[in-house]
Amino acid sequence: MTTKNIKTAERVFKALSDSNRLRILKMLQVKPMAVCEITSILKLAPSTVSSHLAILRDSGFIIDEKDGKWVNYRLTDEYIEKYVAELAPLFKEWLEDDPVIKNDMKQAKTVDRFVICKQ
């Protein structure tokens, strides 16, 4: 494994090594979301959520897309990194029985940016 590959693997596994980032990935399985929606569910500061999203984006799990005044985050379907391409399909099946994940995914279905994101 070359240094580049080690750094890539380190970035990917760092992304998966935090419970809040795992929760975000599972929520994004439900639908694309804005920072304020994720913040509302996780009960974290927007800056903290943005940091988690940056790590997930830099590792290749998610992308962000500008939509008017919103920035939507969603799972990517075009994997650049081999490790993400191999792990992402497996991850979709992980944690399905976890009560926190179930609750997050339930909230993700109903969270409304127009109600909570007063912009």
Image (spheres, grey):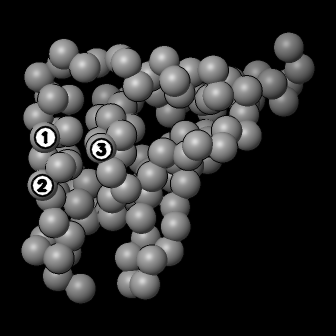
Q: In this view, does 47 lie above or below 11?
A: below
Which one is earlier in the sequence, the residue at label 1 or at label 3? 3
The local crowd at label 1, few if under 14, some if 14 to 19, many if 20 or more residues have their Cα within 10 Å, is: few
User: Quarter of the image containing the C terminus?
Assistant: bottom left
Secondary structure under tag 2 reads helix
Q: Which amino acid does label 1 sit on?
A: Lys
Measured as percent of width and height from the top left, residue 35 is found at: 32, 62
The answer to whether mark 2 and mark 1 are in CB contact below 8 A is: yes
The residue under label 3 is 30
Specify the quadrant that holds the N terminus: top right
Going from N to C along the chain, the mark reached first, 3 or 2, is 3
Q: Name the residue under label 1.
A: 106
Asked which quadrant contains residue 3, the reply is top right
The amino acid sitting under disc 2 is Thr
Q: Do we see residue 5 in this rendering?
A: yes
Q: Which residue is drawn at 41% across and 25% down?
A: 92
User: Who is closer to the viewer here, 84 or 19?
Assistant: 84
Query: Are there few (<14), some (14-19), or many (20+) residues within 10 Å of tag 2?
Result: few
- Relative placement, left or right, of 74 versus 107 is right
Which residue type carries mark 3?
A: Val
The residue carrying mark 2 is 110
User: In the image, is 24 to the left or to the right of 90?
Assistant: left
Residue 22: % across, % down: 36, 31
Where residue 112 appears, as percent x and y from the top left, is 16, 66
